[in-house]
Every structure is written in C-alpha cells, then in structure tokens.
Image: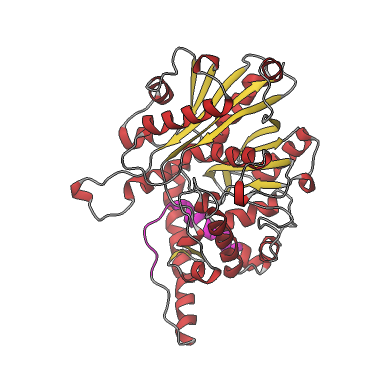
Amino acid sequence: MSDNVYIIGSAMTRFGKHLDKGVKALTGEALRLVLADAELDMKDIEAAWFANSGWGLSEFQHNIRGQVALTANGLARISIINVENACAGGSTALHSAWMAVKSGVYDCVLAIGTEKMYYPPPPEEAGKGKGRSLDGFISGTDVEETRAFMQRLKEEARKKREEVEKEARERGEEPPPPPKSHSIFMDFYAAGARRHMEMYGTTQRQLAVIAAKNHNNSTLNPLAQYTFPQTVEQVMNDWVVAYPLTRAMCAPIGDGSAAAVLCSERFLKRHPRKRAIRIRASILRSGDRQAPFDTAQRAAQAAYEAAGLGPSDIHVAEVHDATAFGELSMTELLGFCPIGEGGPFAERGATALDGRIPINPSGGLISRGHPIGASGLAMAYELVTQLRGEAGQRQVNRPRVALSENGGGSLGNDTAALAIHILSRD
C-alpha cells in the first residue's frame, strides 16, 4: 500500500462552446497538457479512468468511450476504465485513480474527464435552443419518480411566480419575464432555495452576491467559459429560470476536458517534482432516497477525519455551484459557517478571494463552466494551481490546504453521488 498519493500533473482546456471540436479532440488537448505539466510521457501512464456522461446520448458512443477517446490520441494497451456518475463523474475518476495508487496496484495513473454538450442543431430543430443537451439531465435522477415530481415543482414555482408578479405590479414595477427552458436540476435547486428562504430568511440578493462573486472571479481565469463581470443588480435583473434563481445564478452547459496525473510516494522519490500536491483525503458517498439531505455532511465528516483536519483548516475551496444556492448550501454543510447563515456569510465577503474562506476562485460552475464529466477534475486543477501559487490575479493568499466538493444526480431529496477531496502542499 502506498503511504501517500500525489497529483503531479493537472490541466484543463478552456471551457466553453467548441463547435469545431469533438470528444476525441478535447480529450487529446487535455491529455497533452497534463502530461506536459507532469513532465511525463504516455509510456509512464499505467492505467486511466475516463469520465463522461453524455457521449452516448448525443452521438451513440456507449460502452467503450474511454478506449475510443484515449486510443485516438495515442494512449493505448493500458487498463482504461470508463466512469459515469452524473456531474460527479470527474471526481469519481479521481477517487478511483487514487484508490488504485493507494492500494499499491499502480504507481502512475491518469484521471481524465471530457464532455461535449454544444452541437449545431439539425435544420428541423433550428431555433429551439439547448433542448438536445438539456433533455439528458433527467437521466441523472430516478426517471420514473422524477416525471411526477417535475409536475409538482412546476406548480409550486408557478404559484410563487404569481406572488412575485403581483408584488411587482403593486409596487408599480414591470414583472420579470417568464422562465425559459432549463435543466430539471434548476427546479430542484430552486425548490431548495425557497425552503431555505422560508426557514432562515435567506434573500434573493444574497444568492445574487454569490453569483456576482463567481462571475467576477472568472474574469481573472483565462480558461473560464464566462469572463465578463456582473454586479449584484445585474444578476438579480437577469431573467428568472426558476424563482428565486435567475440565469446569472445558474451554471451554463459547455464543452471541455480536464485531467490529473496521480502517483505513489515511491514513484515521486524516483521522479522528484517540486510542484507535487498531496491528496490528504478522497471520499465518495451515495445518497439515500429515504434519508434527509445529508450526503455532503457525511462525506465531509469522513474527509475531515481521514485528513485529520476540520473546516477551519481549509484555506480555499471549490464547491459544486450548479446554482448560487448550491454554493450557499455547501458553505453550510461543509462546516464553513452554521446552518442557515450561508447567505449573511457570503454577504459579509467571507467567501471572496480575500475572505476568510475563499470559495470558487475559478468562477465555479456558474462561470468557469460545467462540462459534466470534466467538472470535478477542473475543481482539482484550480485547487492544485492555487496550492502551487500559480493562479495569477485570482491567487488566494498562501493556501496550504484545499477542499473540493462535487455532487452528481439526485435521489429522492438527496444527492445521488458526492465526492470530496482534500489536498495539501505537504
């Protein structure tokens, strides 16, 4: 068994709309970048875990996605394992690679995730928006139960929207425009946000503060999908996806790839790297459809125990902000602030780049982008970059310990899969 496991290579492509690149091309770009960062050749890689969620749905490439994408770029003959775990796929690949090295089976392995979500619409669907990509999101749930649940959520959202429109008219203001097509998960997050607002007094403005922070962080990240600033007012005045969430509070779809090379301590001694980052904890947990929303707390507790650390020891974090409420919720569930206080905590600037616990310095899913299978490894890339002190203008002040939280799918009232990684410089 390996004493410690290290990340010695980390890379990502720019996230965004790449109509000229497919999964193979994006994978090849990330593969070349990560090998260069690790100062290794393909012959040094003993096994690879490839994360992807939608290639089968979009292009009917099922079953051997990793073999197709990696061998097309020259990485062949080794063990290639395919990973599909909804939005947690990238972190699941990282966790699986970590387990293989930790157990002593391999000394140097690759975790890579790629997603292609933008496609030119066929002529008969021109002007219909993002339906091709959005239709697949329901598969990250128990589909049979979700269809009925969607109807209940839509009715709840409709009633709330009528209240908001009535209040706007009474104030003599123009009601916000009606919601447009969106992922079912935005409805889940919106329902959670409304419950949080009712229980703790959280405001839509506090959600806007989080979204604006992440949009502004992304202006300092040249690999982010969105690199334009947003004020709190601009976020609040954007069109409503599902109340209280506006478009600027929600992650976009996108294309991209991210990767990490992991190695054992004995490999590192043979191939010294001054920029190696240690994986202090790697935890993957599944939800329970009969239990309360507690997967993040269970996973965080296990990660803190494995690392011998607590929330106060974390200097920077990347969390799964598929919406601004996702970040608010994780700020609480990971122990960075008490339950119910995530809104005021963000409003005080505690999660800003110069705050007590900077969260999503990359811009997060909201602005860095969210190519499903690549997101978890993009989080790792950001944290590795921060711990190495190489993040440029978005660099956090001398971090030594970092945490990522990456959730995927929905099961009952809980997250279906959730991974937490704790990394450190020593």
Q: Residue at x 51, y 49 (%)?
A: 368
Name the quadrant of the C terminus.
top right
For residue 401, what is the image quadrant?
top right
For residue 262, what is the image quadrant?
top right
Question: Does residue 175 appear to the left or right of 417 in the view shown?
Answer: left
**Please, which colouring scheme is shown?**
secondary structure
What x and y, as percent, mark residue 418? 60, 40
Q: Which residue is at the far right?
A: 308
Residue 183 lies in the magenta stretch:
yes
Numbered label tally:
0
Q: Residue at x 64, y 55 (%)?
A: 329
Whether residue 220 is visible:
yes
Whether residue 83 is visible:
no
Between residue 240 and residue 314, name the one nearer to us.
Answer: 314
Question: Does residue 182 appear to the left or right of 324 in the view shown?
Answer: left
Q: State the extent of the magenta-drawn residues as a range.
A: 178-195
Name the quadrant of the N terminus.
top right
Q: Would you place residue 82 above or below residue 372 in this image?
A: above
Residue 136 lies in the magenta stretch:
no
Between residue 283 and residue 212, name the one nearer to us.
Answer: 212
What x and y, as percent, mark residue 227? 48, 55
Q: Residue at x 68, y 14 (%)?
A: 270
> What's the magenta bit mostly, secondary-structure-wise?
helix
Q: Residue at x 58, y 53 (%)?
A: 326
Q: Which residue is at the far left?
A: 123
Q: Which residue is at the far top?
A: 77
What x and y, as percent, mark residue 157? 47, 65
What x and y, as percent, mark residue 120? 27, 45
Between residue 209 and residue 189, name the one nearer to us.
Answer: 209
